[in-house]
Image: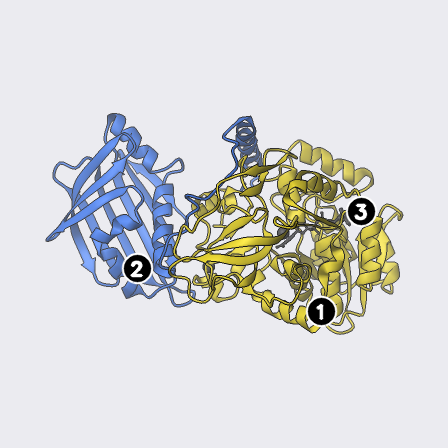
Chain colours: A blue, B yellow
Amino acid sequence: MAHDVQDSGGVRVVSTAITIHRPQREVYAQWRNFPGLPRFLQYVESITEEGECSHWIVDAPGGTVEWDAEITADVPGQVIRWKSVGDADVVQRGEIRFEKARQGSGTEVYVTIGYRPPAGLLGVGVAKMMGKGPGKQIDTDLHRFKQFMEYGGIATIHGQPRGAAQHDEWQEEQEEDKEQKAREAQKEGVPA
Amino acid sequence: MKAVCFSGLRDISVETVPDPEIILPTDALVRVSSTAICGSDLHLYNGYNPAMKKGDILGHEFMGEVVDVGSEVKTLKVGDRVVVPFNIACGACYFCKRLEFSACELSNPNAIEAAMLLGYPAAALFGYSHMYGGYAGGQAEYVRVPYADVGPLVVPRDVPDEQLLFLSDILPTGYMAAENCNMRPGSTVAVWGAGPVGLMAALSAQLMGAEQVICIDEVPERLELAATRCGAQTINFQDCDDVVEEIKALTGGRGPDAVIDAVGLEAHGTGIMELYDRTKQALRLQTDRPNALREAIQACRPGGTVSVPGVYAGIIDKMPFGVAFGKGLTFKMGQTHTHKYMRTLLDHVLNGDIDPSFIISHRIGLDGAPDAYKAFNDKHDNCTKVVMSPFAA
Ligand SMILES: NC(=O)c1ccc[n+]([C@@H]2O[C@H](COP(=O)([O-])OP(=O)(O)OC[C@H]3O[C@@H](n4cnc5c(N)ncnc54)[C@H](O)[C@@H]3O)[C@@H](O)[C@H]2O)c1
Ligand SMILES: [Zn+2]
Ligand SMILES: [Zn+2]
């Protein structure tokens, strides 16, 4: 979960990595089953496959975005590359690479996604979806994928009880406090 | 059901909330028979964790009876009497397989938020803020326990709760703190903090054959327990000029083989360093007050081990790191791998080697929680450990 974000010519490139404690072939096979991906990818509504092409429907805040993607490389157990084709709402290309982990018997998964967000409101929605910190949504989705591969389910607290008190001044004070601390930590050169 | 909720800085409320339900097929529901307040809860109480939300249900030390299990739970059964470890671990990930349960990579639904803030995806804990997963805690009548086949330890019916409850946290924590010292028969060890964790560490050191245990605190009744129940020599740091010198005087001038900081980020101090730390912490220039840790490093003998079960959260200042380097000290620390120690310690309890119930000073119902948090925090009313029984008549 270390990501790197660069902008080049209006294209935003996010790369990240995660280690999954399962064999390379298994991790590849689960990912290659595109119609099954919405289980892990929080905002992806559906993916349908027709030959070399797949159709993605994504539920971004502000509206639904859709695109067709085509596989540009597919080496079983090792790598999948794709790019959007035709009149895509979000122009993008991506790569997911699977390597034998150096620690233990798992798989190192490397993901790079380059995308050009649409203009207007939808663009704002897509930006939101990609998270406050760029790459956060990709990391979250990969962590969900990891949970599914290693444990078979995804952790949640949704639906548990809590006390009546809601968001209030305490929260806001704490938020300010957090930002203040982060600024100071940065000043001292220490991660917050 | 009734539950103890966080309501803001030093504000605890007892509320009626919906009963928990099975959410995932690997969950269990536990009806809580006993639950304790931990020194770690005091860090939340005192506002050191910004990821607490008002209304969060507190508590991570609890035991009780299984009243429901999800469809994929294999070993745990309705009716089992269980003690539940405070960390939530999946049992399947790289770290769980290495028995490093407190580094579980999967249990925290907010792992990415935690990683963005801390640099690592902290494992989940019961009742310990949204940074650690946001799971509702066990200071309640009922609690949902995820990964039901991994955490809960089934315990026999004929042993009272008070002897078993602390398997959930402080007994394994004290035990791991002692184990981290590479304790051998004949070892000498000094323990800062005679709170529940320090006392369990002192007791564990004895069990591992330590020849000399020295406990340091300022609360007389806690030092009394260290002396009478853990075979320790005691130092009240308010009554002596220089704790480090005092310890050296008790250990042939050299210092103990190992030192344990069972105080953590809210250490009290004396004199100018205390003022320095309080001011810096108030100004947020340092997040933690490392008084005990500084002394421990200074007192430890060359080549010795510094074991830190006390919780630290952020940045500390004025660490005598040159001394640590010069003496070639080994540092061991961290959140306890509770699951790893529970069975061994259950055996010790059943054999009669350990009875940790001596630390309990207050036995109450959930309604007493607000007063009990205050007494435990202020070290008033001889409060050494609070146990709440949600259903006691
Ligand atoms: N590592 C873990 O997994 C784990 C588990 C449980 C608790 N903890 C931590 O262990 C620490 C102790 O927990 P507890 O339940 O015993 O809490 P506690 O607050 O009851 O005990 C702390 C004791 O330290 C004493 N103290 C304060 N400043 C001191 C100083 N400068 N020198 C010596 N003693 C000093 C206090 O008087 C008190 O008796 C806390 O930080 C808690 O969060 C860690
Ligand atoms: Zn605790
Ligand atoms: Zn795990």
Q: Is residue A120 above or below residue B118?
A: above
Label 3 Cα crowd, 10 Å radius (few <14 / some 14-19 / many 20+) = some
Label 2 Cα crowd, 10 Å radius (few <14 / some 14-19 / many 20+) = many
Label 1 Cα crowd, 10 Å radius (few <14 / some 14-19 / many 20+) = many
- Label 2 lies in ligand 3 vicinity (Cβ under 8 Å): no
Picture mark count: 3
Q: Chain of mark 1?
A: B
Element type at marker 2?
A: strand
Residue A65 appears left or right of A17: left
Q: Residue at x 76, y 59 (%)?
A: B358
Q: Nearer the viewer, residue B94 or B37?
A: B37
Looking at the picture, which amino acid does disc 3 mark?
Answer: Asn
> Could you say where residue A9 lies in the image, as x and y percent from the top left?
26, 34
* Residue B235 appears in the rendering: yes
- Per the model, the C-alpha gap separating discs 2 and 1 is 44 Å
Do callouts 1 and 3 point to residues on the same chain?
yes
Q: Which residue is mark 1?
A: B183
Do callouts 2 and 3 point to residues on the same chain?
no
Q: Which residue is mark 2?
A: A98
